[in-house]
Structure formats: structure tokens, C-alpha cells
Image (cartoon, rainbow, N blue to C red):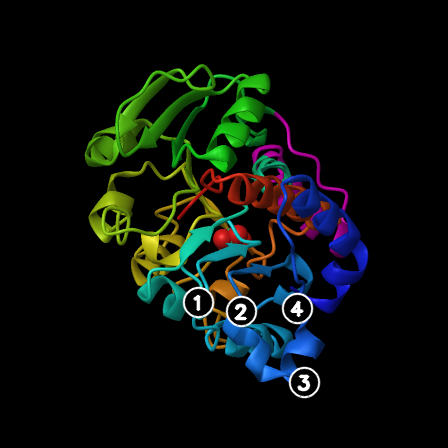
């Protein structure tokens, strides 16, 4: 684990282990580097939030952490601060059968709030007001120019994990109709109805907000294809906080450039970091954030609490939660 987590949570982890009758030897990054032979005894590793600091490319702390993890021959369990299991640095562990537990859901609140902030700002016409403010122009919009009522609009939420469910919960407060799309049909209180990925094309003609918060998988890669985008009505906006490759990005850019789609808020992209040459940076109907919708000061404490719950399960013989 990181030096910082060792310092701030080491005593609590030791106490948990002692209560379970287990002797826990903590290896922080500095000591591991000083003594590579110690890696032979490592059973589990905790990739905590402060080591991440963005990427790709991985931060120096991330690179150092995984260079040690990948040399630990007996590693059985890796706990990671992310929701996704698709960070490139996890691959060597996954490939050799290490159990991965994630912090899925830890940042569901902050991500959903970023989504709702962008949705409300677009729905209420803030882009128009902000542009007018920059020009020092008094430009009210009334009558036919006024924004449409948000209540009653149809949101299609793709991916009903903790993030999708939190988005749906907040959308319901705003009075939207919500269809949730997931791998298997299932009745869920947060949405009005659920559909499966294969049903998505049929939902798009009547969609005001297409919200993507699903993981990247063989089923979701390219799910929002050029053909799917063409089915959306011109009033529709797309929000993606899942993974960039769920959408055909070139087709999305073309739809946004031509006005075929009203707008987008994007936190994730086919290639990250987004190339400075991408037209997305300067499209007037696009807001974007650098895979940062989750950022929130409380995430670290939630990650630590999650790791402790998983450690307890591990020490007492259960399976860590959110196993990827
Ligand atoms: C994650 C993410 O997987 O932020 O946690 O994309």
C-alpha cells in the first residue's frame, strides 16, 4: 500500500487483522522499493486513490506501485480505487488470475451530480446566457425561444450500476420519464421501465437525453453507432460518463457539427487524453471534462472504507465485494 495509506490507516488495518487472528505485515511503497525480496511475501495490494492522479499516461506513483505489484509472485488480491476494471495497469494482474476488487459506486454521487449539473445547465439555457454575458449583451429569451419544460422529457439511461441508478434517482426528482437500459431486464424502482442493450435502437426516436454510464464490454463497445445516432431526434443531447468507446466518436462529431444533435456533455473519449486536434474542444454545443466527473474530496475516505470492508471479508475467508 502507499506510504500515505500506511501512515493514516495502518494502525486500523493492523487492529482489524489482529481481531481476525491474522498477523498483517504492511509493506509501504518505499520499503518495498528498498527491499525487493520482501515482495515474495505479498498476498494483497491496495491501489489507493491518491496514487492515481489521472492518466493515461499513468502517474509516476502508479507506475512505481504496479512495477512492484507485478513482481509480487504470490499476489492473490488487488483492490483498486476505480469503478472500472479496464485500466491498462491492471492487465498483468488480471492476466495471471489475481482477484480484483473495485470501488464501484464510491463516486456515484459526484458523477451523477456532474451529469445533472450539465443536464440542467443545458436544459435551462445557460450556454445562451453565458455567451450573452461574455458579450455584455442583455438577451432574454421568451415565447418560442424559451427552453422546453424539463419535466416530462424522456431520459434513456444506459447502464444501471450505482452511477446510473443515482442519475435516475435525481432525474426522477426533476420529473423526467426514465428508461433504464442494462444487460438483462429487471424491475428497478429508480426507473419507469428497463430494456436490454438490444432494445436501444427502438428507444432513440423518442429520447431527449441519452445518458451513458455503462462499462465498456463486448456488448457496449460501439453501442451508440452512427446508425443509433441517426435515430435520435435533433432536440436530443448525449451525456457520456461511461467509456468513450461506447460511442462512435467520429459519427458523434459529425452529428454535433451538422446540428443533427442538439448537444453533448462528455467526460470520456475514445482516446484519452483527448487530442488537442479534436473538433470536440471547440464545438459550441459541446461541454467536456477531462475524465474528471468523479472528482470529489470525499472519494479517498470512501475508498479507504471500502478497502477495509474488503479486507475484513478477505481475513475472515469471504470474497471481497465488487470483485471484477
Ligand atoms: C473509474 C472511472 O473507472 O473514473 O473509476 O472511470
Q: Are marks 2 and 1 in contact (CB under 8 Å)?
A: yes
Q: Is the residue indicated by label 3 positioned so its CB lies within 8 Å of ligand 1?
A: no
Return the residue at label 3: 34
**Is residue 133 in sight in this rendering?**
yes
Q: Quadrant of the N terminus?
A: bottom right
Residue at 73 percent across and 59 percent down: it is 5
**Which quadrant would residue 112 be assigned to in this image?**
top right
Percent position of residue 319, x then y: 45, 40
Q: Is the residue indicated by label 2 positioned so its CB lies within 8 Å of ligand 1?
A: no
Left or right for 140, reference 250: right
Return the residue at label 2: 41
Left or right for 182, reference 90: left
Looking at marks 2 and 1 on the same chain, the residue that comes earlier in the sequence is marked by 2
**Is residue 285 in sight in this rendering?**
no
Percent position of residue 32, x then y: 64, 77
Looking at marks 3 and 4 on the same chain, the residue that comes earlier in the sequence is marked by 4
Q: Which mark is residue 21?
A: none
Helix, strand or loop status at disc 4: loop
**Which quadrant would residue 117 be assigned to in this image?**
top right
Above or below residue 16? Residue 152 is above
Residue nearer the viewer, 184 or 292: 184
Looking at marks 3 and 2 on the same chain, the residue that comes earlier in the sequence is marked by 3
Looking at marks 4 and 2 on the same chain, the residue that comes earlier in the sequence is marked by 4
Q: Are marks 4 and 2 in contact (CB under 8 Å)?
A: no
Percent position of residue 98, x then y: 39, 59
Q: CA distance from mark 1 to mark 4?
A: 14 Å
Return the residue at label 1: 74
Return the residue at label 4: 27
Q: CA distance from mark 3 to mark 2?
A: 15 Å
Looking at marks 3 and 1 on the same chain, the residue that comes earlier in the sequence is marked by 3
- Boundaries of the magenta span: 120-142
Left or right for 132, reference 102: right
Amino acid at each position: 500500500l502507499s506510504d500515505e495509506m500506511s501512515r493514516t490507516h495502518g494502525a486500523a488495518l493492523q487492529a482489524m487483522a489482529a481481531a481476525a487472528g491474522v498477523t498483517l505485515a504492511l509493506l509501504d511503497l518505499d520499503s518495498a522499493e528498498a527491499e525487493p525480496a520482501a515482495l515474495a511475501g505479498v498476498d494483497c495490494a491496495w491501489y489507493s486513490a491518491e496514487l492515481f492522479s489521472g492518466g493515461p499516461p499513468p502517474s509516476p506513483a502508479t507506475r512505481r506501485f504496479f512495477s512492484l505489484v507485478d513482481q509480487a509472485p504470490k499476489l492473490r488480491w488487488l483492490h483498486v480505487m476505480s469503478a472500472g476494471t479496464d485500466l491498462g495497469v491492471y492487465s498483468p494482474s488480471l492476466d495471471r488470475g489475481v482477484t480484483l476488487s473495485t470501488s464501484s459506486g464510491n463516486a456515484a454521487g459526484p458523477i451523477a451530480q456532474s451529469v445533472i449539473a450539465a443536464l440542467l445547465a443545458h436544459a435551462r439555457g445557460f450556454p445562451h446566457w453565458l455567451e450573452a454575458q461574455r458579450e455584455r449583451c442583455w438577451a432574454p429569451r421568451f415565447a418560442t425561444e424559451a427552453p422546453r419544460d424539463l419535466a416530462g422529457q424522456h431520459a434513456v439511461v444506459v447502464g444501471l450500476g450505482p452511477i446510473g441508478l443515482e442519475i435516475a434517482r435525481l432525474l426522477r426528482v426533476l420529473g423526467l420519464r426514465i428508461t433504464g437500459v442494462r444487460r438483462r431486464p429487471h424491475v428497478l424502482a429508480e426507473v419507469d421501465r428497463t430494456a436490454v442493450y438490444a432494445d436501444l435502437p427502438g428507444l432513440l426516436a423518442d429520447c431527449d437525453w441519452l445518458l451513458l454510464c455503462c462499462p465498456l464490454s463486448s456488448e457496449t463497445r460501439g453501442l451508440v453507432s452512427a446508425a443509433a445516432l441517426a435515430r435520435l431526434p435533433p432536440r436530443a443531447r448525449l451525456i457520456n460518463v461511461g467509456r468513450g468507446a461506447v460511442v462512435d466518436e467520429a459519427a458523434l462529431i459529425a452529428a454535433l457539427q451538422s446540428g443533427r444533435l442538439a448537444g453533448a456533455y462528455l467526460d470520456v473519449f475514445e482516446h484519452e487524453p483527448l487530442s488537442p486536434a479534436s473538433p470536440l474542444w471547440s464545438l459550441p454545443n459541446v461541454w467536456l471534462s477531462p475524465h474528471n466527473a468523479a472528482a470529489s474530496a470525499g472519494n479517498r475516505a470512501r475508498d479507504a472504507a471500502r478497502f477495509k470492508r474488503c479486507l475484513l471479508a478477505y481475513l475472515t475467508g469471504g470474497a471481497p465485494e465488487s470483485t471484477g
